[in-house]
């Protein structure tokens, strides 16, 4: 393999084990460019009919032939996406593949050149393509849970949650929703008057997720939930997301660099390469796909 970076030191001269992108703790890691090249080689022809089948009887979030990006730069090339109500979808792929750009496009952070995004099922489908992020949250129930460091460190836990309800008609409504969050997560309730900056990494991530719940959204866009967390906190975060999907009926679209953890969690998985869908399938099927395993799951 030509495009490989290897660790130097005591292992010099030993056989180097090649593992998947982003696995960590390895003797040799495939470069991002090499992962993209190999992933492009194993890309399949993905039809909308296949995506519909994965979403079940009817899709709740639909993207049709989306071309989107930043400024005049197109990142997503004719992307379509389907996910059913109360399902979860995990997007994996090398850096620069367009994973977060899909979340940004759904929430209104990109320029959309063509295509359509709809939310809802039956006769209640809403075209959200041109709505602002605030409109998408208030009218369509779409919430974005950003990557790490999106909390307000100088505010208390309680104040951070109040900020999550900034679109409520009355401040009292945000405070009432905050109390419901505290009832659900006693760990946060015990720290309600603490400044957010003193929380542990896992508690900060719980606060970020909880702040999004104040508006009681139906769709959660979750960007890298495990980033920067210790393993015990990663498990906690995925347990919270599992509860939100299976017990509260949230629909979850996730970008996750820890591909194994993301695919174990999700009902559906898409592999993205260069702004296009290279592989799509059930999460379990992608976990057991040797091509996906070699590139993204550590072999």
Image: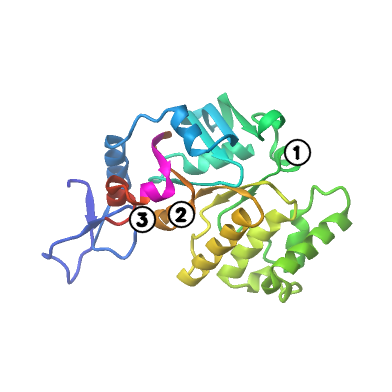
Q: Main secondary structure of the magenta part?
A: strand
Residue 280 falls within the magenta-colored stretch:
yes
Give SS at disc 3. loop
Q: Residue at x 22, y 51 (%)?
A: 4
Side (left or right) of 48 relative to 131: left
Q: Is residue 112 above or below residue 223?
A: above
Give SS at disc 1. helix
Question: Which stretch appears magenta?
Answer: 277-286
Give SS at disc 2. helix
Question: Are the residues at dot 2 and dot 1 in contact (C-beta closer than 8 Å)?
Answer: no
Residue located farthest toward the left when viewing the structure as drawn: 13
Give how far across and how far down residue 100 sits, in percent.
51, 44
Q: Which residue is mark 2?
A: 262
Q: Residue at x 60, y 53 (%)?
A: 245
Q: Is residue 246 above or below residue 100?
A: below
Residue located farthest toward the bottom when viewing the structure as drawn: 190
The mark found on residue 218 in the picture is: none
Give how far across and how far down residue 229 sits, in percent.
49, 66
Q: Which residue is mark 1?
A: 139
Tell me the distance, in whole angstroms, between the alpha carbons under discs 3 and 2: 13 Å
> Which sits earlier in the primary sequence, circle 3 or circle 2?
3
> Which sits earlier in the primary sequence, circle 2 or circle 1?
1
Give the camera-side residue of 89 and 162.
89
Q: Which residue is mark 3?
A: 22
């Amino acid at each position: 393999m030509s495009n490989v970076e290897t660790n130097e030191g005591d292992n010099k001269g030993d056989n180097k084990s090649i593992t998947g992108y982003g696995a960590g703790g390895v003797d040799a890691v495939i470069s991002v460019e090499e992962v993209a090249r190999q992933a492009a080689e194993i890309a399949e022809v993905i039809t909308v009919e296949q995506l519909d089948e994965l979403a079940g009887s009817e899709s709740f979030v639909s993207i049709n032939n989306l071309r989107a990006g930043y400024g005049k730069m197109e990142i997503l090339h004719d992307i379509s996406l389907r996910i059913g109500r109360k399902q979860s979808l995990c997007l994996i792929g090398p850096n620069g593949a367009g994973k977060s750009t899909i979340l940004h496009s759904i929430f209104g952070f990109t320029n959309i050149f063509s295509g359509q995004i709809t939310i809802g099922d039956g006769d209640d489908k809403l075209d959200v393509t041109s709505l602002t992020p605030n409109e998408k949250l208030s009218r369509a129930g779409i919430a974005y849970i950003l990557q790490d460091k999106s909390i307000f460190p100088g505010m208390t836990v309680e104040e951070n949650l109040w900020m999550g309800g900034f679109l409520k008609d009355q401040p009292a409504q945000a405070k009432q929703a905050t109390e419901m969050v505290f009832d659900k997560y006693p760990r946060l309730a015990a720290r309600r008057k603490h400044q957010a900056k003193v929380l542990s990494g896992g508690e900060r991530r719980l606060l970020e997720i909880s702040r999004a719940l104040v508006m009681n959204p139906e769709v959660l866009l979750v960007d890298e939930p495990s980033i920067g967390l210790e393993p015990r906190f990663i498990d906690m975060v995925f347990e919270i997301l599992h509860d939100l999907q299976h017990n509260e009926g949230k629909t979850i679209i996730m970008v996750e660099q820890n591909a194994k953890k993301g695919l174990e969690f999700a009902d559906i998985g898409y592999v993205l390469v260069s702004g296009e869908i290279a592989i799509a399938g059930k999460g379990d099927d992608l976990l057991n796909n040797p091509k996906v395993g070699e590139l993204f799951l550590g072999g």
